[in-house]
Image: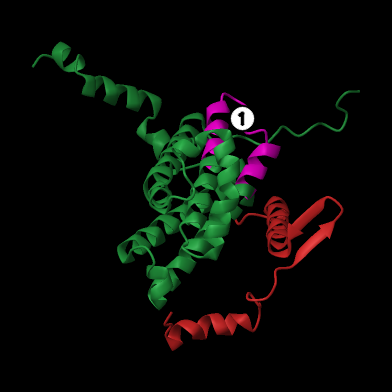
Amino acid sequence: MSTLEERSTWTVRLREAGVRALPPERLLPDSQPVFVSSWIYVFGALTIAAFAVVLVSGAVLALGGVGWWHRAATGHFFNSIHLWSTELFFFFMVVHLWGKFFMAAWRGRRALTWITGAVSFLVSIATAFTGYLSQQNFDSEWIGTQAKDGLNASGVGAFFNVLDYGQMILWHVLLLPLLVGLLIAGHVLLVRRRGVCPPLPAKAANDGK
Amino acid sequence: MVVSRRAVRLPGMFAALFNLNGHPHYVHSGWFLISLGNLVVVIAMIVVFVLALVLPFPRRKQP
């Protein structure tokens, strides 16, 4: 095949576009700017670490099946790991969000990075919500019956029925985690592409005089 | 529901520190209403946020 024909295939065009957008040294850098040496920059990575624990503990719960966390001590243990890793996931994510908000981290063509982060936060709330609906206890019953009126009034009840356990657990274990994972992956790739947002410039003592 | 002794032991140990079976506690003042557990988490997040801003980050010593 000639070089011209090779360049006309979609796989080659996709590969070249990918390398142009994210060269290997930018995708997996070996150094970061000096301002990244701050604890406030750690919470994004901590959020991803907590998300990994959420996914692994959720996968173990899926192996045991629904109700396993009520019947067996091991199931109860992994249910607790799943809950507390979710708590930490939101804890770290909120601190990360505060840090980036007060840093105005959408500066320098980083609007899409900010938007994917904010949307992943909102979708994570929906994911946690369907998790609370999947507990199979009085708490989930209470949450479901309280939520149905508001959601039905908004019009989404036709395809998102919080009283349908089967539908809620499938949203919880497949659709929403997949969406959160894709958003986080896109967010990280955008951070790699645009670089970490620098701190706001310090004002000189005689500014405005 | 049958629960093994092993399953009860660990929660029982923590129950000595935090009673999770009692009535929930709320902080209520006028329009402001929040459960004590949520308030503790919000305060902890603010504390961690401030610490992340002020605590020095360990750096490698330059050769």
Could you tell me which chain the residue with mark 1 belongs to?
A
Q: Is residue A42 visible?
A: no
Looking at the picture, tell me which residue is in the foreground, A13 or A64: A64
Q: Give the range drawn in magenta.
A: A95-120
Name the residue rendered at 32%, 66% in the picture.
A64
**Residue A198 picture quarter:** top right
Residue that carries the numbered disc 1 in the rendered image? A106
Looking at the picture, tell me which residue is in the foreground, A54 or B34: B34
Q: Can residue A153 be seen in this view?
A: yes
Q: Residue A137 lies in magenta, yes or no?
A: no
Judged by its main secondary structure, the magenta piece is: helix
Looking at the picture, tell me which residue is in the foreground, A77 or A44: A77
Q: Quadrant of the C terminus of chain A?
A: top right
Residue reaching furthest to the left = A1
As displayed, is residue B34 above or below residue A78? above
Residue reaching furthest to the top = A4
Name the residue rendered at 59%, 44% in the picture.
A149
Within 10 Å of the Cα at label 1, are there few (<14), some (14-19), or many (20+) other Cα atoms? some
Residue reaching furthest to the right = A209
Under circle 1, the secondary element is loop
Name the residue rendered at 70%, 68% in the picture.
B24
| Residue A158 image point, x, y percent | 46, 36
As displayed, is residue A16 above or below residue B8? above
| Residue A94 image point, x, y percent | 62, 48
Query: Chain letter for red?
Result: B
| Residue A172 image point, x, y percent | 43, 50
| Residue A99 image point, x, y percent | 66, 43
- Amino acid on which disc 1 is placed: Trp
Left-right relation of A16 to A201: left
As displayed, is residue B9 above or below residue A171? below
Query: Chain letter for green?
Result: A
Name the residue rendered at 70%, 56% in the picture.
B42
